[in-house]
Image (spheres, grey):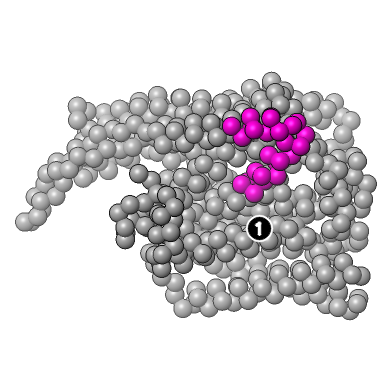
Amino acid sequence: MDVLRISLQVLLALTSLFLTLLILMHKGKGGGLSDMFGGGMSSSLSGSSMAERNLNRFTVAVALSWAVSVILLGVVQRFA
Amino acid sequence: MLTALARAFRTPDLRRKLLFTLGIIVIFRLGSFIPTPGVDYTAVQECLTQAETNSSLLGLVNLFSGGALLQLAVFALGIMPYITASIIVQLLTVVIPRFEELKKEGQTGTAKLTQYTRYLTIALAILQSTTYVSIARDPARLFGAQCTAQVVPDQSVPILALMVLTMTAGTGLVMWMGELITERGVGNGMSLLIFTSIASTFPSSIWAIGQENGYAIMAAVIFIGLFVVAAVVAVEQSQRRVPVQYAKRMIGRRMYGGTSTYIPLKVNMAGVIPIIFASSLLYLPALVAQFNDPRAEWVLWIDRYLVRGDHPLYMAIYFLLIIFFAYFYVAITFNPDEVAENMRKYGGFIPGVRAGRPTAEYLDYILTRITLPGALYLGLVSLIPLIALVLFNANQNFPFGGTSILIVVGVGLETVKQIESQLQQRNYEGFLR
């Protein structure tokens, strides 16, 4: 059980770091605070490029593995 | 109304957007319940039931995260770091000349500023999760003295670091999900996420009032809440329309202009931002006091006057701060000189006012006068929960309180308007008549 837990923890640490980096690599689409609560036109007509789409896919994959490792760690801890 | 909703779902484009938004919201809510690894879930639940009312310090932050904060969930910080980062960057545009330049640059400059905001968000997330994890080591400070269970069983450094890392990544994920909603869904993602977290606490807090104070009071609270919602909607929608006439111009063989429109000057142009600014500013002394000796003279003073919301001094400071920030924010976002300049460039003028500087002065005059009732209204609405605290003896998470109701109504209106405009591309009738 210990081996499983430690390997999951390492996996979680790695995916956390990776996820943060990947998210920072995206181009910010929210226009900040000014158009957050009313006002401001959000006109994002531009489609996403191929690189952006690959980045999206990659981020989703990492996010999924991050979530899975968080949940598995919770399960392991519950039954430890 | 219902047929409009059905029509919204029958439009394939809009249906995809709505479902996408709903999906992200579901993921966001799920993440607010998954505990961070290293946290003892049963101990947290135990402490939560014991110390429902005792969390006035972290009350607002907990509200913004939809209760995820006190659950020590992976999304514990929610979007609070992003809000704080946006506020900071917004304020810095006044102070740092380079930021001001970027803001004036238009699209590319704004994109750069957004990028700075994102970096700052991650930095703040690291900072806040570290403080938060260090507080959580001693559960009595988080939940009140009754809580004796050990929330974080294993307090070795690697585990704590892992918790910080996980929470930071969670915050980043929330930020990205918000951006995804803005990009592919309906409405503005960040505000929708705040909306969900605040709205999710409504039913449970109403229920709590019913159980503590009786169901007659619960009905009264709901009634007052509906009344406040109606009043808030009325003020949010009200605006002064300054007429603008455009001169006819011939360019080549085409005729341009000749139309008459208006500039809408909203009574409450700043939205809820003054309230958020004021409450985060008032939260600072409490935060500082928390890290110091709890018996020191000034810590006791802060505890007495600035932490609990029912003291008159606290209310007065809060009120004044909100009025100040209302003016401040309107001054940042609406620049009369720029508007006047643009109008002159395209041959527009306000009837009876000369173009150029007199127009700017006229707009400024109207704006200053119209913002006064707006600011007073914001201040009064935000005092509702504090007054209710005294009247009903309810806890500070009073559901129909100022901040929450303003955010919920503001975001709701904005989102419905956006769906409406999408719907009108295909049908003429929408939600709003």
Say left or right for B186 vs B193.
left
Residue B174, horizontal then vertical, whole percent: 62, 59
**Residue situated furthest left in the rendering:** B253
Residue at x 79% of width, y 37% of height: B53
Q: Is residue B33 left or right of residue B94?
A: right
Q: Is residue B211 magenta?
A: yes
Image quarter hosting the C terminus of chain B: top left
Which residue occupies 40% across, 59% down?
B7
The three-letter amino acid code for the residue at tag 1 is: Arg
Residue matched to label 1? B29
Compared with B123, B235 (above or below) is above
Task: Identify the magenta region.
Answer: B198-223
Depth order, front residue of B29/B212: B212
Q: Which of the pair B74/B299 is nearer the observer?
A: B74
Horizontal and vertical percent position of residue A18: 67, 71
Secondary structure mainly formed by the magenta segment:
helix
